[in-house]
Amino acid sequence: MFKKSKLRGEFFMQGDIACAEGAVSAGCRFFGGYPITPASEIAERMAYRLPLLNGAFVQFEDEIASMASILGASWTGVKSMTASSGPGISLKAENIGLGMMMEVPCVIVNVQRGGPSTGLPTSWAQADMMQARWGSHGDYGCIALCPKNPQEMFDLTIVAFNYAERYRMPVFVMTDAIVGHMTEKVVVPPVDEIEIIDRRYTDKKPDDYLPYAVGDDLIPDFAKVGDGYRFHSTGLTHDERGYPDMTEHAQLTHAVRIVEKVKKHADDIILLEEKGVEGADVVVVAYGITARTVVPAIEMARKKGIKVGLMRLITAWPFPTKRIRKLAGEIAGFVVPEINLGQMVYEVERCAGGQCKVKSLPHPGGGIHKFETVLSAIEEIAHAK
Amino acid sequence: MQNEICCESPIIAGTAEPETNIQHPMEGLLRMDRMPHIWCSGCGLGSVVTAFVEGLKKAGSDFDKVAVVSGIGCTGRVAGYINLDSFHTTHGRAIPFATGLKMANNDMTTVVISGDGDLFAIGGNHLIHAARRNVDINVICVNNFIYGMTGGQTAPTTPLQARSSTAPYGNYEQPFNLVGLAAAAGASYVARWSAMHVRRLADSIAVAANKKGFCFIEVISPCPTVFARKNMGGTGLDLLKSFGERTVIDHDADPTKIPIGMNDEIVCGNFINEDRPTYWENVQTGIRDAVDKENVYWKNL
């Protein structure tokens, strides 16, 4: 059967490799992939690692197949993952929706590059944040994690697996070409010391089992193929039995539930890092690599006497609505730098609800925010108080 | 066998009082709580489902270790009616879904049942690559020459000159020869039958269930509702009779040379039955030495 990873220690490791190692440490033993810059190193590392652990690596004929395959693999109880970049995620979108609808635990890594279309294959952006949230048609809840360095590529990939298993859904790791291709120190703890959450299997007998019946936590218990449950799962709207049910009632219960289950557990899912936010006049909201590149400007603003804090979104989705809404009533305004032409800023504006200023600092990708741009934005908000 | 049992049923014979405890001969393997099914009367899919269940029985399959994966369309609904671990996936993606399932649990007999449009138009790339890899899955393609569920549009199998709702003047596209394509892509087992050949079809399904490697079975199936109505007319039974009259059984036929025209003969048979290493075997044996050698390095970590 599957072997445990023996990797441990301190390494000088590339972000993409750290992501693959995080997956392996989390227990991922199936990877379906397709080559794409700047995510290929994840597939390459999995192709090297999984055979050593008796797992399976399959390089598929396209991105669509690789996404469909990890759903099939996950139904056997095996943790599965795929990794790609914007164009590939666009192709995976339909089957991401299938994973949401069937409630299949799996992890999708998006090493973001500049877009739209082929865009900047070898350069970076953070322009797929809304795609992660809304990229497949219809309504569904979404969990997306934003690592800022190779260490977090390792750590947050494990968290992504834990969330996928706990909440029974595909979970995104939204990184970018800078973090993916950056090499830094990564500490890999012994695998037995890592907190791993596994999906909750049903304790019911096959005759009593309803694949989509839920309790208070809105998360159905899992049964895997081959165990005699002989269950059915479909991308159609379905009832508790998993059978197609083309009624408003079914849509009101099931389709609403896959949104509500994320909302219900949002407080347990959301991960934030705040520095100097309490008592601040200006709060910079950033995520991923941008949460690092804006730090010098924030430090300079503080030296100039401006009370400015940094709120780093470790989970972009679900969005920390409550926290932003509360802060909006206490501060002069938010500054939202991101390497896209304004995406997460919409969420900040929504939550601020006109209580304070919200300044978007867009960047189209292929570069990072200039020190002066961020500093002057912070000053502008502080002086407008 | 099924027909005999049905005919002995008092309800069908209409002679005795209805009994309430009559069991369907395939009770247990069909989801009876989902009946009646959505398929039109005269459709060939009921016969295909029967042949599939019969085939698994003949093969002696452990039903708990069989997974059925379907795509989208009329045939895509098969998974929902068979009482096994079953998945109704996205349009064209049943094969990669099944490949992932099989590679993650090699104990599962994994069967894709889907239609010609699903498997050869939107999902065509997956089919040829699964055949090339010789993934150990079975694909049963129900070919009714048309997109049925969406209302009778041209499929990659629609014969030249046949009418469809998107070919109102007749089809001007060359169709695929499905068995030829599967064979050329490297399938280990290739057969073609029609929904009239239920016993031969069940036999082929049984062979495929116990055969390693990529197995492909095409089933010509009547669609009275859209294909016949736009073309030759007639009921499902009329179409079945016509398939019977047009059938030539030739197991030695070259599958690449037997396309299906509007009124030509339909060559059926078990065309290819070869053994070549499966994808799983190649993973297990082909790279084992190299993996073991690398694992020595990891042991010393």
Image: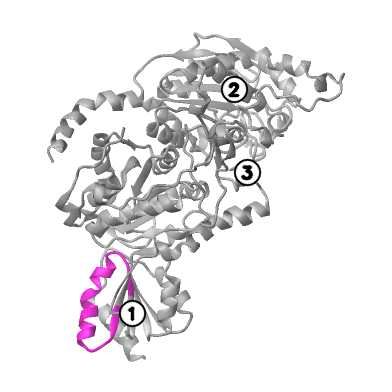
What amino acid is at disc 1? Val
Residue with the mark numbered 2: B53
- The magenta segment is A285-309
Q: What number of labels is visible?
A: 3
Q: Is residue B244 magenta?
A: no
- Residue A362 visible: no
Q: Position of residue A164 (x, y in %)?
A: 41, 51
Q: In terms of secondary structure, where does tag 1 sit? A: strand
The quadrant of the picture occupied by the N terminus of chain A is top left
Q: Position of residue A106 (x, y in %)?
A: 40, 47
> Nearer the N terminus, badge 3 or badge 1?
3
Q: Is residue A178 above or below residue A25?
A: below
- In the rendered structure, the answer to whether residue A111 lies left or right of residue B75 reads left
Q: Are marks 3 and 1 on the same chain?
A: yes
User: What residue is shown at x 36% (from left), y 54% (from top)?
Assistant: A160
Q: Is residue A380 above or below residue A262?
A: below
Q: Is residue A304 magenta?
A: yes
The quadrant of the picture occupied by the C terminus of chain A is bottom left
Q: Nearer the viewer, residue A299 or B60?
A: B60
Q: Which mark is residue A283?
A: 1
Q: Is residue B128 above or below residue A215?
A: above
Inter-mark Cα distance, 2 to 3? 22 Å
- In the rendered structure, the answer to whether residue B287 lies left or right of residue B32 reads left
- Residue A355 visible: yes
Q: Position of residue B270 (x, y in %)?
A: 51, 13
Q: Which mark is residue B150?
A: none
What amino acid is at disc 2? Val
What amino acid is at disc 3? Pro
Chain that bears disc 2: B
Residue with the mark numbered 3: A244
Q: In terms of secondary structure, where does tag 3 sit? A: loop
